[in-house]
Amino acid sequence: MLATDDPKQQRIIGDFPILAKPTSRGKRLVYLDSAASSQKPQAVIDALVHFYTNDNANIHRGVYELAERATADFEAAREKVAQFVNADTPEIIWTRNTTEAINLVSYSWGLANLYPGAAILASQLEHHSNLVPWQLLAAKTGAELRFLEVDAEGRFKLEDLDRKLRGVKLLAISHISNSLGTIAPLDILIPRAHAAGALVLVDAAQSVPHMPVDVKRLDVDFLAASGHKMCGPTGIGFLYGKRALLEAMPPFLTGGDMIREVAYESTTFNELPWKFEAGTSNIADAVALGTAVDYLTGVGMDWIRNHERALTAYALERLRMLEPRGLAIYGPREEQRAGVISFNLADIHAHDLASILDTEGVCVRAGHHCTMPLMRRMGWPATARASFYLYNTEDDVDALVTALEKAARLFKVA
Ligand code: PMP
């Protein structure tokens, strides 16, 4: 059941206070931009207030009770995130977001392990966060940056995978494309990359919030995600890395907290995970991310994945009815797609389209979605993008379709 009369669905919607606030035009808020950032349940908002009201102090330093409590909350949140992705707790490094986690690997592992003649393999689908760091690393080390190609529907072309993997030291790949919703075939890519002698970094910004992700089952070497896309606050994310790899890597940022012993001449570094956490961390947001993980686990990651799968199928079915009126829908078919749908309506610019949808309370993203090379590869100047999460329903999809029909009328495209 997807409609709002499902009691579980109703409870979930009720957990997100912002969804009850009408827009300035008095419309119901139809939030279809969770791929950019998710809304927050009351429990997460409360966790932030609770921390600052009751437990706030700097961590790992004070010996007084309050500081010990703050430290315990902070480390308990790390443990929750570790369990959420089936990692060992010291393998979870707090970062600001996915972008910082990828940069950490690029600077720390990349500078030490790449050289002229070595290669990095990404895909044509990558977000700038999983592309620009590798461009810079390639330029610094003399390594080559290559791309796995996708077809016109954004599906991976795997025919020449083994050739592409020759000499590759790192495969850096997004689990789910934020532009097209393509789910990468990690069960094929990761073993093949390992067999070719490469490590694998997965940009899981769009997967960890939406489906069960198990780093051990995937056998991934590094995995990056952002708290703000998984019902948590902004400013907190994490890197998972296999312990032996993290132990062998030099620190990324340096300063307080990441040290064991400092003399004027030299320094020894802290153990994992703190070796990679220089300076005062984003304590309250990490704690609240722990609450977000509790919340998602309570709902059930399988439930969320199935809900989004059904909703995406419903949305594609309804949107296809608008194809005769000029709606172009991009991306792969249902089986290979997560809850992301990019589209254009006739020759209306995506920004204009998104502005019209906004007048109906429907929030969608418009533009290049931080995937400029992909837009160029596909020949689209921009797209509008609807993305779903646990709080969206068939009613939201219906509102999107009605708003698109209004846009078609306004622009007289049908
Ligand atoms: N990778 C993907 C696939 C994303 O969708 C995003 C966010 N849109 C990022 C990386 C970057 O996430 P953040 O801005 O939280 O670092």
Image: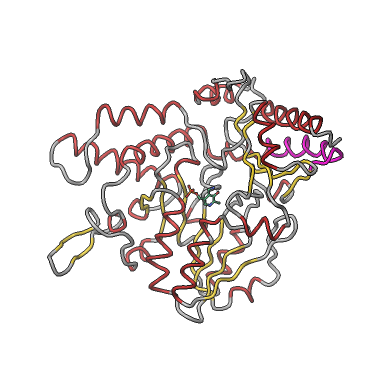
Vertically, is 77 above or below 276? Answer: above
Side (left or right) of 396 relative to 110:
right
Which of the image's four quarters has the C terminus?
top right
x 64%, y 76%: residue: 163
- 40 in magenta: no
x 56%, y 64%: residue: 190
**Which segment did they paint magenta?**
311-327
Rendered image coloring scheme: secondary structure
Vertically, is 17 above or below 195? Answer: above
x 21%, y 59%: residue: 259
Q: Main secondary structure of the magenta part?
A: helix
Q: Position of residue 211 (x, y in %)?
A: 56, 44
x 50%, y 78%: residue: 118
Q: Position of residue 10 (x, y in %)?
A: 58, 22
Which of the image's four quarters has the N terminus?
top right
Q: Position of residue 23 (x, y in %)?
A: 58, 22
Picture quadrant where residue 113 is located? bottom left
Q: Looking at the picture, tell me which residue is in the foreground, 166 or 326.
A: 326
Q: Position of residue 366 (x, y in %)?
A: 64, 42
Picture quadrant where residue 3 is located? top right
Picture quadrant where residue 374 is located? bottom right
Q: Residue furthest bottom?
A: 117
- 320 in magenta: yes
Vertically, is 2 above or below 167? Answer: above
Q: Residue furthest top?
A: 26
